[in-house]
Amino acid sequence: MAKGAGADPQQSTSGDRRAGAAPDEGQPVVADGMMPLWAVSLGWELRRGRQVILNGQIRDRWWFDDSPASFREVVAGTLAARGAEVVGWWDPVGGLTFPLAEHAERFDRLAAAPPATGRGDGAVRDGAGSGDPGGADSGGGVSAAGAAADNGGGPRRDAEEPSAAGQPTGRPRRDGERQRSRERLFAARTPGRPRSFDDVVATVQRLAASPEAATAFVFEDVDHHLPADRPESQLGYLRLRAAMAGAVTPHSAEGPQPHARNAVLCAVGDVGRLPGWFHLEDPRIAALHIGPPDPSERRLWLTWLLRYFDGGRHAARSDLEALVGATDGMAGWDIESLARTSRLRGAPLQKPDKLLELHRLNVNVDPWAQLDRETVARAADALATRVVGQPAAVNAVAAALQSAFVGVDFGHSGAARPRGAFFFVGPTGVGKTELAKAVAELMFGDRSAYARFDMSEYQQEHAAERLAGAPPGYIGYEQGGELTRRVQERPFSVLLFDEIEKAHPKVLDKFLQILEDGRLTDGRGQTAYFSECLIIFTSNTGAEELRTLLEGSEDELPYSALEAHFTRAVEDRFRENGRPEIYGRLKPGVVVFDMLRREHIVSIADRLLGQLTESVRERHRVELVHDTRTLHPWITARMSEPEHQAYGGRQIRNELEQVRAQVVRHLLEHRPVPGSRVRTEIGPDGEVRVTTDATDTTDAPSPTGTAETAGTANAAASADAAGPGGSASTAERGGPA
């Protein structure tokens, strides 16, 4: 092609970049303001004799000729710079259009011209006569134009063609019907541009197979017009592939070889929506992925947009470079929108972390900014009221929350890691889940900000797709991932991944990107940002050996020994799974929960009994009083056994099930009247006893549950121990989770 094809491929000027010339040997190719790198790759593929399927970010804007340009403008300009006399563009909405001036008139003249009647000079030039190894023909000695003619791109002879020796080649004579069909196919068309897809492809096939003019055509979103899952679409793809494969080199190609053929390209958002055989089975067709702008291209964008940023006129080069790194993965449209966000929200260029947070989340109320400083400072006290007997865990979480609130960290890169990442490990039933719920309510004031993912449901390798969504073409692709969809809807969340040791190792790989970069892209290409989330993993790794440790210790096992045991067990588990890098990122946030000590058993038991009291009062208007003088020694003795200690607070509830069962039985059998008082106690034989006090109805408590008796004082004490809202679930009230 005339423009650029004749340039010396070893030159490194901007003109050569536009023509797709090779750079200096050993020198990297970087954006220079003339065209994006994928456009350079497009030129190289065309000169290799291939047709190209452009896929990826075809809706984005790019830097072309020192100014922003759309994808269509970049492709059309690149093809024209390579010498294309006609650049046509087809899409399902607009049909066949021409993005460049005067190209429509040239197309009309070419389409109206009668086809060539024989194998002309172009066939010889494209075949062995040109010495072009990338010609369309792949059979020795037969020209590409001739091959196209045999496929409908030119006239054929009905009679047997004689060989060089004058003998018949054996080709059978075409009958009269084939002759008439061929005449209709190659007859001059009436004036007017083709409208339907089939007519456009037929015209493009004829022009691309003719060496008389340099042509280039792009079919955009053909995957939407011809869905791959419909059988009737196969013929359309076959016709399009025939047009791509039958293209020849035009006569107008100048300069050093090899020359590009007439271009017939496709542009789709996802190459996976095309039939695999369409491009995978043909080496003459290459797929070229268009990713987001690289650092050099982002630097061009930001340099051009610098004056539009808040504080951009006073920005230093270091500020620009920090923003170049922070915008990794962003599209050209996003970078332009980032400048608008900076000006609208008053976010200066010099604070890339805050600017990107405002741009990505687009929220007017930041729960972190709305937190009361006094509340954060006293976070440990607030959490301790919900989780009993875990001072080490509560203090560690409170310290991390205070650090996230203050916002002090080691530098800033725009990576926007999560606000905090914890790994809760320890015996079962000691409050790990309850602490996560308490954090969600404390920081965001809303229990719905807490989301739990049971990792026992992710034991299979393919379950990793549930977190980030299935890839294109698979069932559930349109829905996205469970995790990414949750974060996109609620960016301010506490995410609990319960029993992480049960997940498949492939599932753990998804968390590497979350912990390091604070983002995860789903199968639809949409990115979820975790910069405002708290990530909590819980695990019972090492709990199976806890009973053995307790039985081998004469005295109560100290917390230091327990901490060393669980820390070692977690590290060993990650090494066994072949994921030590995940443990390395989580190690600062590993929090070992203590087992329930004897002094905490009574407190948790009183809470559970208080919840039972409140439930009986609300449903039956009966005052339930617990004899703590017998209940406390009984539950403490039961929980002192090693097999019970290993199950933590859940075992306390299991033991108190005996009390609840006897209360239920008593209510069914004796049907105490509203206002009466029912008492529970432990008998000398260790059995639970439930009796109804014979009290005067005048002294009976009112429907609200108040009474002025000694027995009622005990009930009130139990209710106080339960705290406000005693009717909540066991886990919610600080009991084991």
Image (spheres, rainbow, N blue to C red):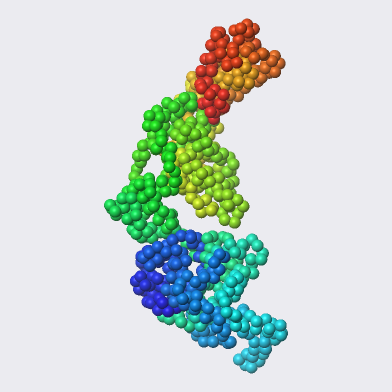
Relative horizontal placement of residue 424, taking residue 232 as reference (left or right) = left
Displayed quadrant of residue 332? bottom left
Q: Residue at x 33, y 55 (%)?
A: 306
Displayed quadrant of residue 176? bottom right
Where the C terminus falls, by quadrant?
A: top right
Where the N terminus falls, by quadrant?
A: bottom left
Closest to the observer: 464 or 491? Answer: 491
Q: Farthest bottom residue?
A: 166
Q: Is residue 399 above or below residue 149?
A: above
Q: Residue at x 45, y 26 (%)?
A: 384
Residue 421 on image: x %, y %: 45, 39
Displayed quadrant of residue 142? bottom right
Closest to the observer: 591 or 242? Answer: 242
Residue 115 on image: x %, y %: 57, 83
Q: Is residue 130 above or below residue 12?
A: below
Closest to the observer: 701 or 693? Answer: 701
Q: Is residue 626 visible?
A: no
Q: Is residue 495 visible?
A: yes
Q: Farthest front residue?
A: 191
Q: Is residue 627 above or below residue 615?
A: above
Relative horizontal placement of residue 630, taking residue 354 as reference (left or right) = right
Relative horizontal placement of residue 566, taking residue 677 as reference (left or right) = left
Q: Is residue 506 above or below residue 162?
A: above
Residue 632 on image: x %, y %: 55, 15
